[in-house]
Image: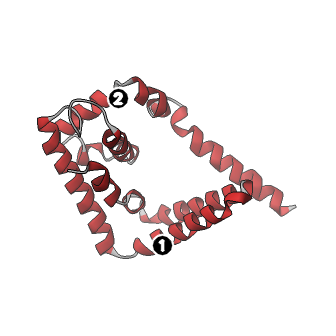
Amino acid sequence: MDWMLKIEEWDPKIFTLSHVPNKYRLFVSKFVRRVVIARMSEAPDLASVYHMKLRDAYEIEDKLKDQDIIDQSEEKLVKLLDDAEMQLHETQYLAGREFTFADSMFVPVLVRITLLNLEKEYIDCRPQIKEYYQLVKRRSSYKKVIGKHFSGWRKYRILVKTVCFLCIRSLFRMY
C-alpha cells in the first residue's frame, strides 16, 4: 500500500475548517486570507505562489458550502485511520519496523486531530493508532519539531505572533 498517496488524497483544510464552529468559520477564513496577503507583501518574489494559496483559500470556502464534500473528507480520513489501524496490527510503523517518510506524513494528520481536540473521536477509539502516536511522541525528532508547540504558552505563540503582526500591519495602513 502506498501510504504517501493515501495520505495525500485527504484534504486536511476542509476537515479542519468543517470542525470550526460556524460562527467562527468566516473569521478563520478571513484570517487565513489575511495571513497569505501579509506574507505576499513580505515576499513579493513569491507572489505567484501566494496567489495560488489565496485562490485555494477561496476554493476551500466554496467547498465548505457543500455538505457532500465535507462528508467525503470525513470518510477519507476515517478510511485512512482504519487502514492505518489494520496496518499497525502487523507492524510498528506504517511501512514496517522503521520510521519512514510515510510516518512523517501521517504524524501531522494525528497532530491536526489533536489540535482540533478530536482525539477521542478519531485516535483513542483505535488502540493501535493510539499506541503508535504515543510511540511517535517519544521520538526526539517529534519533541524537537512538534512537541515543543504543545507545552504551555508555546502552544499559542505562532497564533499570537501572527495576530499581532496583522493588527500592527492594519494599524499602519490606517495612517
> Circle 1 sits on which residue?
59
Instruction: Say what amino acid the circle numbered 1 marks.
Output: Glu
Location of residue 117 in the rendering, given as x and y in whole percent from the top left corner = 36, 45
Between 55 and 62, the residue placed more toward the observer is 55
Q: Which mark is residue 167?
A: none
Q: Secondary structure at mark 2?
A: helix
- 59 vs 10: above or below: below
Residue at 32% from the left image edge and 36% from the top image edge: 100
The answer to whether 74 appears left or right of 50 in the picture is left
Residue at 51% from the left image edge and 68% from the top image edge: 56
Q: Residues within 10 Å of mark 1 (few under 14, many from 20)?
A: few
Instruction: Say what amino acid the circle numbered 2 marks.
Output: Lys
Q: Which mark is residue 137?
A: 2
- 163 vs 149: above or below: below
- 15 vs 153: above or below: below
The answer to whether 136 appears left or right of 142 in the picture is left
